[in-house]
Image: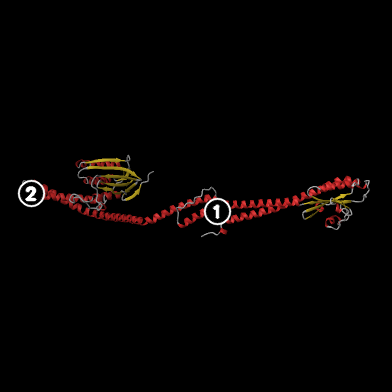
Amino acid sequence: MKVTILNKLSTRLILIFLLIFIITISVYSFYTIKMIHENLGQACTQNAYNISDVIKKSTRYGMLLNSREHVEQIINTIATEKGVMKIRIFNKNGMIAYSSDSTELKTIVDLEHTACNSCHSIKPIPTTLPVKDLINKSEGSLVLVNPIINEQACYTADCHAHKSTDKLLGIISVQMSTETVDSIINQSTNIFISGVIATFILLVIATIFTIRYSVNKPLRKIFVGIQEIGKGNLDYRIELNRSDELGLMAKEFNSMTAKLKSAYDEIKDWNENLNKKVEQKNQELKNIYEQIVQVEKLASLGKLSATVAHELNNPLEGILTYSKLVTKKLEKFDDKEKYDEIIKILQLIADESSRCGRIVKDLLQFSHQDEIQFVHSSIKDVINRALKLMSHHFQINNVTIKTDFKVDDIYVECDAQRIEQALIAILVNAVEAMPEGGTITVSLAQEMDNAVIRISDEGKGIPPEILPHIFEPFFTTKDKVKDTGLGLAVVYGIIQQHGGKVFVEQTSIKGTTFKISLPINHSKQNGKETQNISS
């Protein structure tokens, strides 16, 4: 959308300033020209009056002596001055007694004439009038009359031409040329008007350039910036290096644009990654759901295991006891060879009964039926006891133990024997993962409000398809005759009971790392979980 010229701010400012200039300069010019005319006119009038006064004073002595030649000489001499057109002296009857123009002598003027009427219209005739009333201006000339007042020296003179009762003896009339003054006035007026016009033009040009570069150009840049933002170009910046309000406006505009760009990029990034984030959250929810299902399955299996274990424990103990008793009785007979096969069968029954007893024991441990005692225990001591119990097993299997305790010690409310049992189960799996021997690293650290134990081996790792099932009861990849598949399930149950987490942090062909996280302030007594508040 384009703005018309008349609607532009710069145009309006220029028109306002021009109107102010025109009004101001017009008023100033009018009064200045008027003053020039008045001052020069007054100067011309004053000059004429001074000449008439000089004539009056110069001829006074000649008139007292009634010396006509003397008076005429003075009048003719002064009449030769530049600008003096004619000098005349009238008597009180209106007759020209003396004149620089000899052809006018003895001529009587009309007293009703405008030049005479100003005095003769007043009865008695005044002896003094304002200078402005003694002037009669015409085209190119100015006539000034100066009255000659009767004095004592006049009516006491030898000529006795006048009486003492006469107030006005005559009038001196001086006609001056105003061409020079008019020329000066016209020239001064023209020069002044030319100067005013030139000044006005310069002011107009200066105003236009000032408004254009100080207002119009910055506003245009800001307007272009707004248009670019409207088009979606959030990278556009207004280049306006000024310290005034427009400069601050440009800086604020650029800051606003940068913030809009940042917000737009964030929204755009969010829109682009929304599907990925939704999929990620769905996967997380799926994993959580699978964990919940796993926990429910373990809980149900735990209850079932407890029932089965209690039901099988007594028969198994009886079978084991009676098989050992029969074996001992048969061994007392002299003919042992006759009963060797029976003894082997009984021994097999005893071994299998013992194996079933271990499964029942693991099931009881898995089902958490035994009461757990939470005690303020040192995790470092628990780790050391587990390693000590496993030391012989490590030596037999050519395994080296390396410890990395990043803290001096961490104390946790826990059942130390159960935690020790969980550690031993993971250590046994780590040894079995390295049939050729290797190094097992056990580390202890504190992360947030948790004690973190990591057990790393140098085995071949856990295949991805097996990893989700390693904590399931009876799941094993080992010899099913020797392994019950309850080891990691028991570990999972123990750590869950302590409010912690156990999972595979890393696995590859270079080894596997199990991470156990136990809350430092967690405790459980009589089947109810609480939180210890440290003071």
- Residue visible at 53% across and 53% down? 219
Residue 530 x, y percent position in the rendering: 35, 49
Q: Report the side of 194 relative to 126 (left or right).
A: left
Residue 8 x, y percent position in the rendering: 56, 57
217 or 87: nearer the eye?
A: 87
**Badge number at residue 153:** none
Classify mark 1: residues with Cα within 10 Å, few (<14), some (14-19) or many (20+). some
Residue 139 x, y percent position in the rendering: 77, 55
The Cα atoms of the two marked residues, 2 and 1, are separated by: 121 Å
Quadrant assignment for the C terminus = top left
Considering every residue shown, the one lying at the far top of the view is: 408
Count of all numbered marks drawn on residues in the image: 2
Vertical position of residue 412 compared to residue 27: above or below: above
Q: Name the residue under label 1.
A: 216
Q: Is mark 2 on a helix, strand or loop?
A: helix
Q: Name the residue under label 2.
A: 339
396 or 300: nearer the eye?
A: 396
Mark 1 belongs to which amino acid? Asn
Residue 223 x, y percent position in the rendering: 51, 55
Cβ atoms at labels 2 and 1 below 8 Å apart: no
Q: Report the side of 477 relative to 267 (left or right).
A: left
296 or 100: nearer the eye?
A: 100
Mark 2 belongs to which amino acid? Tyr
Is label 2 or label 1 in front? 1
Q: Which colour scheme is used?
A: secondary structure
Q: Report the side of 380 relative to 120 (left or right).
A: left
Whichever of callouts 2 and 1 sits on the residue coming sooner in the sequence is 1
